[in-house]
Image (cartoon, rainbow, N blue to C red):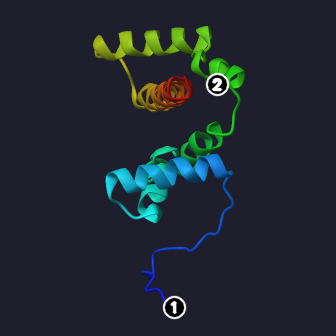
Amino acid sequence: MAYNIPMNMQTVTIQLPKNVYERVRSAARVQRRPLENLLQDAVSAGLPLVDDLPPELADEMTTMTLLNDQALRQVAGRKMPAARQKKIDRLLDEKQAGQLNKVGQKELDILLAEVEHIILVRAQAAALLRQRG
């Protein structure tokens, strides 16, 4: 039997424990969906959406799915080091006062990108922990 597989699809063969297979098969039957579609959705839902992220952040987010709960709790508790946070506060004060030069603005942009990175990683860790129960 020949299957028409779209060019952007990859065929994968996996072995599932019988109880997992039966649950998936039952869910597919109840939803009246092909088993393959249900498995595709399950795999996609288990992975972070990283298509629009910088490669370094995308790799970190993907790797986080392999961490145990204790490691994820550590990631979820990650904070900006106090000295760097003080530097951000000082630079923001300078900016608000109209005294921030180009070098300071560049430094602030770098620090704020670091804060954004920490926030995204913390949120992903928290979401994974919530998903695991």
Q: Considering only order in the chain, which callout, 2 or 1, is on the residue closer to the N terminus?
A: 1
Q: Taking 122 as reference, is 17 left or right?
A: right
Q: Of 72 and 89, which appears nearest the observer?
A: 72
| Closer-to-camera residue (61/16) | 16
Q: How far is the residue under mark 1 from the one under mark 2?
A: 45 Å
Left or right: 56 in relation to 28: right
Q: Is residue 52 visible?
A: no
Residue under pointer 2 = 72
Which residue sits at x=70%, y=24%? 71
- Say above or below: 126 vs 53: above
> Mark 2 Cα within 10 Å, few/some/many (few <14, many 20+)?
many
Q: Residue at coordinates 68% horizontally, 51% vertically from top-left?
A: 17
Q: Position of residue 76 (x, y in %)?
A: 58, 20
Question: At x 57% / y 40%, what residue is drawn?
Answer: 61
Q: Mark number for residue 1? A: 1
Q: Which dot marks residue 42?
A: none
